[in-house]
Amino acid sequence: DTALTLGRVQEEQEDLGIAALPTELPRQFCVHTIAVTPLVFIAPLDRGEFHVAEPPDWSGIPMILSESGLGRERVDRWFKEQHIKPRIYAQVAGNEAIVSMVSLGFGVGLVPKLVVDNSPLAHTIRVLEVDHDMESFNIGVCVLRRKLSNPLIKAFWDLVVGSPHRK
């Protein structure tokens, strides 16, 4: 969870973190984007008991959503802009939990594509072709500026910043 990661870095429980970056961060953070990934709606592979038409009838589909976080904020805003009141089946902690519940046929979820691409359950779900304007996630390494005075952290940071940006 982005908020937890950033909070742990801010409270100095961790030296650095990797997280989906919110639009605005406190000035005390240095961040470097290492990946950009769109948000995608996922559904279980058709197994008869649960079918999602394209385009989906959102008001009738059970949704598996994050309890909180950047993805939840974006999907809530999108549903509101579309004048859709989603039927929320479950609210879970973590994108992997969303993928698991979707793969079991409990509903449709929204996750970063990077999660789908790296999931061992990718063969059990499908990405829905949904035209939405939700902003992609910038995934980045974050550190408190003052922590860059530590030679070990600075050396790691220099490696991260010097590496080519992957899309």
Image: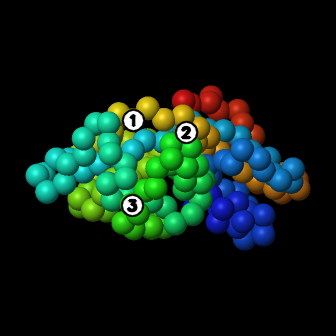
Amino acid at dot 2: Met
Nearest to the observer: residue 143 or residue 129? 129
CA gap between label 1 and label 2 equals: 11 Å
Percent x, y of residue 38: 50, 37
Question: What residue appears at the point 48 percent right and 35 percent down from the top-left corner?
Answer: 132
Is the residue 155 above or below the residue 3 in the image?
above
Which circle marks residue 134 in the picture?
2
Q: Quadrant of residue 88?
A: bottom left
CA gap between label 1 and label 3 equals: 17 Å
Is the residue 26 above or below the residue 140 in the image?
below
How many residues crowd mark 2 within 10 Å: few (<14), some (14–19), many (20+)? some
Horizontal arrangement in the rendering, residue 61 relative to residue 113 (left or right): left
Nearest to the observer: residue 48 or residue 39? 48
N-terminal of the pair, mark 1 or mark 3, is 3
Q: Which residue is mark 1?
A: 130
Which quadrant would the N terminus be assigned to in this image? bottom right
Camera-nearest label, 1 or 3? 3
Which circle marks residue 101 in the picture?
none
Percent x, y of residue 153: 76, 53
How many residues crowd mark 3 within 10 Å: few (<14), some (14–19), many (20+)? some
Q: Which residue is mark 3?
A: 87
Amino acid at dot 3: Arg
Please, what secondary structure does the residue beneath circle 2 have? loop
Please, what secondary structure does the residue beneath circle 3 have? strand
Which quadrant would the C terminus be assigned to in this image? top right
